[in-house]
Structure formats: C-alpha cells, structure tokens
Image (cartoon, rainbow, N blue to C red):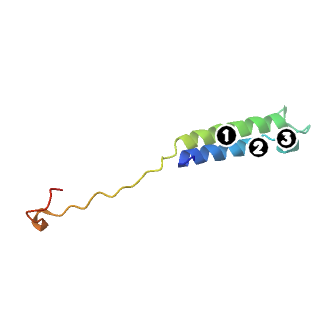
Amino acid sequence: MITGLKNGLAIAIFLLGSTLFCYPILSVFNSTFLILGIPLLFVYIFAVWSGLIMLIYLASKAPKERVVTKKPETKPPEERLPFDSVG
C-alpha cells in the first residue's frame, strides 16, 4: 500500500493531468479562436503542462510525514531511588 503525503500528492497530480488531457476536455478548447496568433488548444496544452510541472515541483518540496515519538520520561536525580536503573 502506498503511504505518505508525497505519494498521495503524486497520485493526485497524475489523476489531474490525466483528466485535463483527456479527449472531452481537449475538445472544448479545439476551436478557431486565437490568442496572440496561437490556437487556443495549443495555449491550453502548454498552460496545463506548465501548471502540472509547477505542481510536481511544489509536491516534491512538501514535507515528509514525520513520526513523532515520545522520549521516555526520566526522573530528576532527587526523585530516583538507589535501585532505579539509570535513565
């Protein structure tokens, strides 16, 4: 089983990219409309591609899940009995 924050983010980004590059979504942007002389479909593809790269970068910088462990409680020296173990 895959665990951890980074693995979850990687799977989410993959699913987002797969969804944004599937045919029904691409067909919405397949028109004759031009942005600065570039077809809208090309602008969409490169914008989504750049966005996914940025998300991958941010996900790689995400902190790892940390396991917090408690330190064993130690008694102050005055509370220890002579037969207690050290620590």
Residue at 67% in and 40% down: 52
Q: Position of residue 79 (x, y in %)?
A: 13, 67
Callout 1 touching callout 3 (CB < 8 Å): no
Q: CA distance from mark 3 to mark 2?
A: 9 Å
Tell which residue pokes out farthest to the front in this image. Answer: 83
Question: Can residue 6 be seen here?
Answer: yes
In the rendered view, tell whether residue 11 sits above or below residue 36.
below
Residue pointed to by mark 1: 52
Dot 3 falls on a residue whose secondary structure is helix
Quadrant housing the C terminus: bottom left
Q: Position of residue 4 (x, y in %)?
A: 53, 48
Q: Please, what is the three-letter code of the amino acid marked with disc 1? A: Leu
Please give the residue where the numbered disc 3 appears in the rendered image.
23
Nearer to us in this view, 44 or 65: 65
Separation of marks 1 and 2 at Cα, in angstroms:
10 Å
Name the residue carrying label 2: 20
